[in-house]
Image (cartoon, grey):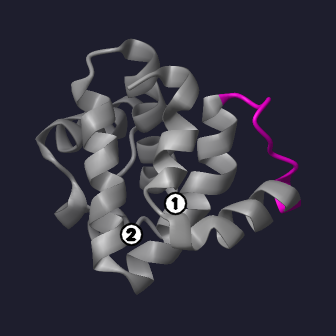
Amino acid sequence: MKYEELYKDFISLFPDDKPFFDELCEKNAVDETDGTHIQFAFVVIPFIKRIIKESPEKTKRAFDFFEEMEKTGITDIQEVVDFTVLETLLNDEPYDFDIYVPYLGKETKEAAHAVARWFDVPY
């Protein structure tokens, strides 16, 4: 797993959703020159918010990917999960992070608790 390829690796897990990713990229002016945090914030997060309501299987696949990112031990990769994915989902009004909890792995759950403490948000 390489930091520079995280977005490409993530969207490759969902080939049927390419039109959705493309639409979000166009809408938010996101392309391959943008940083990983931008790609995750403007494309991956809206995707997660959509699939949590539609597909437990896709949601599990996405959170398994986040778990693998946490397990790398590479700070840059872990920070994408911690400060782009988890912080955003934890701060999402009306604080419905509990809907994501069943999909968290051990490492991701620990990271979510740490992020919640750092930012003093409910979890």
Residue drawn where x is 26% and y is 51% of the image: 64
Question: Which residue has dot 2 on it?
Answer: 96
Q: Residue furthest left?
A: 106
Give the SS element for disc 1: loop
Amino acid carrying mark 1 in the image: Asp
Q: Main secondary structure of the magenta part?
A: loop
Contact check, label 1 and label 2, Cβ < 8 Å: yes
**Residue 49, image x and y in percent?**
51, 69
Q: Is residue 37 left or right of residue 55?
A: right
Residue 31 or residue 83, whichever sits in front = 31
Which residue is nearer to you in this view: 108 or 54?
Answer: 54
The residue located at (54%, 73%) in the rendering is 16
Label 2: few (<14), some (14–19) or many (≥20) C-alpha neighbours in 10 Å: some
Vertically, is 19 above or below 25? below
Q: Is residue 4 magenta?
A: no
Q: Give the residue at mark 1.
A: 92
Q: Quadrant of the N terminus?
A: top left
Residue type indicated by callout 2: Asp
In this orientation, which residue lies closer to the viewer: 20 or 85? Answer: 20
